[in-house]
Image: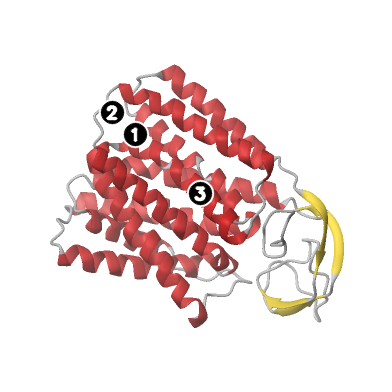
Amino acid sequence: MRKNTIAQGSWIVIAAAVLFGLTTPLVERFGAHAGPFATATLLYVGAAIGAVGRRKAGERAPGAAEAPRLLLVATFGAALAPAALAWGLQRSGALTGSLLLNLEALFTVALAAAIYREPIGRRIMLACALMVAGGGVLALRLGGGDGASSLLGIAALMVATLGWALDNTLTRPLSDFDPRATVFWKALVGSTLSGAVGLAFGDHWPNATETLGLLACGASGYGLSLRLYLRAQRLLGAARTGSLFALAPFCGAAVAFVWGDHHGAALVALAAAFFGLAAYLHVTEKHAHSHRHAPLDHEHPHTHDDGHHHHTHRPPVVGAHTHPHHHDAVEHEHPHAADLHHRHEHE
C-alpha cells in the first residue's frame, strides 16, 4: 500500500516547528547578556553536538560535490540568521520575535515557487493566509507589555527570517542526504564562521548557566528540529514544508503566554484556531494528477513500499536502504508532493 507522504511529512514538520518555536523565548532569555554572534555560535555548537551519532541505515552523507551548497546554507542559516535573531530579540522581545518569524514561511514559499517552480495550489495558499492571519491576530497583543519594540530590532528579525528562508530553499537538494550528517556539517561550519566574527568584534560571551542553556536550545530547537525539517522537506518539498513551519511562531507566543503574558487571551485562542485550521489543510491535502516519470538512474534512501521502487534484491532487503538504482518510464496517478520523484512542472 502506498504511503501517504503528504500527511507523514506534515506531522514531521509540525514536530520541527514546535521544537524551534519553543526555544525562541529561551534564546531571548539565555542570550540577553551575550553578543549576537556569540549566541549564534553556541546555538550551532549545540546543534553540532546533538547531531553526533551513528548514521541511520540506508542514508548517505553529503560529499565534496555538496560542499559549496553546505557553505552557503551555513552562512545564511547558521551564522547570519541566528545572529540577527539574537540581536533583534534583545531589542524587541520574545513575543515580537516569535510573531515576526511568520515571515520566514512567506519568504520560503515565494522562493520555492520562484526557484523550483513548486506547485502551491489554492489549498496551500489558503493555509499560508491562515498562518499570516494567526500571526496578525497575535500581533494585536503587542499593545500590551511588548509594545515598545525597537524598529531596528524588528528589522534585524526580518533579516533573520529572510536568511532562514534562503537557507530553507538552498537546503532542498541536501534533504536527500543523511539529515544527521547535513546538520552536523552545517552547524560546524556555521558556528566556526559566527565564532570567528564574534571574536573579531569582541562579542560578550555568556556565563556558564547561560552557555549551557544556549547549547541545549541549539541541540533541540536548531539541531533536532532541523533534522526533522530535512526529513519533511524530502517528502513535501521546500514550499509546503516552509508553509507549515509557520506554526513555530505560535509555539513561541504560547510560551510567552504561559510565562505570564496573559494579555489578550481571546486573541491567543483565535490565533490558535487559525493555526489549527492551517495545519489541518496541510495534513489532509491530496495533490493528485496523472504524471509521467522519465527513465532515471540515481541513488537515494528508499523503501519498496512507496510505489516507485519495485526492483528486487538477492537476498531480499527489508526497510530503508540506499544504492544506485534504475527507474523505467512510467505514467500513473496518485497523491504526491514535491518529493524527489515528483519535481515535475505544472501548468
Measured from the top left, where is residue 181 in percent x and y?
A: 48, 70
Q: Image quarter for residue 153?
A: top left
Where is mark 3, residue-wise?
16
Q: Residue at x 56, y 26 (%)?
A: 273
Image quadrant where one finds the N terminus:
bottom right
Identify which residue is drawn at 45% across, 47% down: 104
Looking at this view, is 345 or 211 the one in front? Answer: 345
Tell me where residue 63 appears, x and y as whole percent: 51, 80
Name the residue tied to disc 1. 95
Residue annotated with mark 2: 146
Q: Residues within 10 Å of mark 2 (few under 14, many from 20)?
A: some
Dot placed on the residue nearer the N-terminal end, 3 or 1:
3
Look at the numbered disc 3 and give the secondary structure of its residue: helix
Q: Nearer the viewer, residue 67 or 41?
A: 67
Question: Residue 208, percent across and down?
Answer: 19, 54
In the foreground, 342 or 19: 342
Q: CA distance from mark 1 to mark 2?
A: 7 Å
